[in-house]
Amino acid sequence: MSDWWSYGLADLLLFSPRVYYRLFETMNTTWWVVVISAFVAGLIASGFAMRHGHRGNRVILVLLSVIWAWMSYGFLWQYYRPINWAVPYLLPGFVLQAVLLAVFAARPLPLRFGWRGDLTSAIGVGFMVCAFLIYPFVGVLEGRELVQAELFGSAPDPTALGMLGFTLMARGTWRWLLLPVPLIWCVVSAATLWVMDQQIAVVMLTAVWVTIILRLA
Amino acid sequence: MSDFDRRKFLKSAGAVAALGGLGVFGTGANRHAFAQTGAAKDLPRIIQKTIPSSGETIPAVGLGSWITFNVGNDIELRDQCADVMSAFFDAGGRMIDSSPMYGSAQDVIGYGLDKLGARDRVFSTDKVWTAGDGAEQIAETSDRWKVAEFDLLQVHNLLGINENLPLLFRMKDAGQLRYVGVTTSHGRRTEDLIAVMKNERLDFVQVTYNPIDRKVEDYLLPLAYDRGIAVIVNRPFRGGSLIERLAGQPLPEFARDLEAKSWAQLILKYLISHPAVTCPIPATTKPAHVVENMAAASGLLPDDKMREQIAGVIGVLI
């Protein structure tokens, strides 16, 4: 498109916060079994990721791959696409992330997850705690209903945030290939939340900067 | 346009308004005959504005769909949008505006028109917004609205203007479209818009205008008036932020003289009273707000002095 320069960020906001958060309500109530299963799968993966050892590495990668595949179809395709024409451009990234995770799981030596007592691990755990336990309930504190909670495994924001945490907890060659998609999503989401006057945009953007700084350090 | 020219324009425009040049008064559409509900018969007479290129008149307030009608497949919210459309039609409104850029808004309008059986009541207004195949996009838009032909199609934000404007003119010449226009918003690409207005036989132009964003008063609105181009006003409330900022502030005394009961009505009266303006298109999710907006297109309108007062008061409060 030749005239993107003439658009401001606010022009590209196409929906209201009311409509956006109702997407989660509809998904959570319609697909509640899948949503809860995906959240539990994420918790199991995070439990394995805290341990230092070889067991569970493939399980983590497979569970995360399934989660990203579900999120591509569930939230993005079924719910977000009708109100955001940019989704078809973002969707391949989510599918790519699912494929990458599956490929890492299939390698003879998959990534190794575990707590190592360093700053990177600590921040990784912090991102995961935020993704699983804090992010879903920020909306409640802001007055939204619990049924609109954005849960890890089905909602892209906490899942991308948690994915950054998982990646920071990982060791192994090429692990950084798992960062671009969640980083890009965090930026896109931060911009969306920002123009909707949602303060939590700062969390997403902070996660991006912290991850980049850790990667460069 | 120089200050002198602007003053002269406003003076003459005020005179035109005073003589009834703003249009005629009426309650219904003059092209589409439709049965009005009992409620509509009790409503105040809606000011009609004339489309210069045809002489057709349309109600002086329309309905936008940016953000408000992009509700996806949520049936509950779709029904709320249909309620807004119902209130709009019952209050005498006709022009509904959308764009391929607005997500699911076109589908939601189509849903509402289906539910209300109101295709003969709407002045269908949409846009072509692509640097690719404009004809294909218009066909998709038509499918979403479920209308065979649009009343007005506009080149959205001048995108692909060199291909899309000739396409729209060809459609008009072939009898597949009644009016052709171009749009901008936020005061962008003004020079390009002016060039198109000067060089093409446009029926409509759509611009951002409100008591804070008044640049169009200097040159664009007078040019539209001189060239006989109808003007649709987008962002009359700055996407709602103007009303939010003014909430809780008491209305000025002179609002009573204009029978304006809210800031929204005062702003709409400010816009409607400009002789070059044909139709502001406020967007809303609430039927009550539609009724309030439509009521602004009735009763007294401000003269030049009052218009300056309105802009002055709001400018101080914002």
Image (cartoon, rainbow, N blue to C red):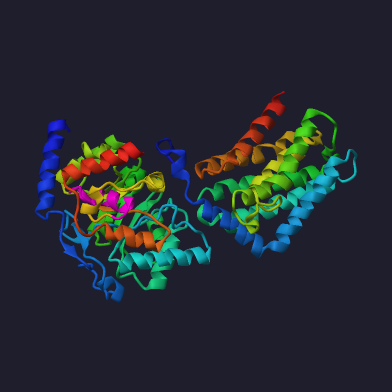
Residue that protrudes farthest toward the top in the picture:
A217
Q: Residue at x 40, y 44 (%)?
A: B245
Is there any visible trace of residue B230 in the rendered image? Answer: no
Rendered view: B124 above or below B237: below
Q: Nearer the viewer, residue B165 or A155?
A: A155
For the C terminus of chain B, give its image quadrant: top left
Q: Residue at x 17, y 33 (%)?
A: B1
Indicate whether residue B269 is drawn in magenta.
yes
Classify residue B79 as left or right of residue B223: right
Classify residue A111 as left or right of residue B158: right
Q: Position of residue B240 (x, y in %)?
A: 40, 48
Q: Nearer the viewer, residue B2 or A62?
A: B2
Q: Position of residue A15 (x, y in %)?
A: 49, 51
Q: Nearer the viewer, residue B35 or A174?
A: B35
Q: Which residues are magenta?
A: B261-278
Q: Residue at x 80, y 45 (%)?
A: A46
Q: Position of residue B143 (x, y in %)?
A: 41, 64
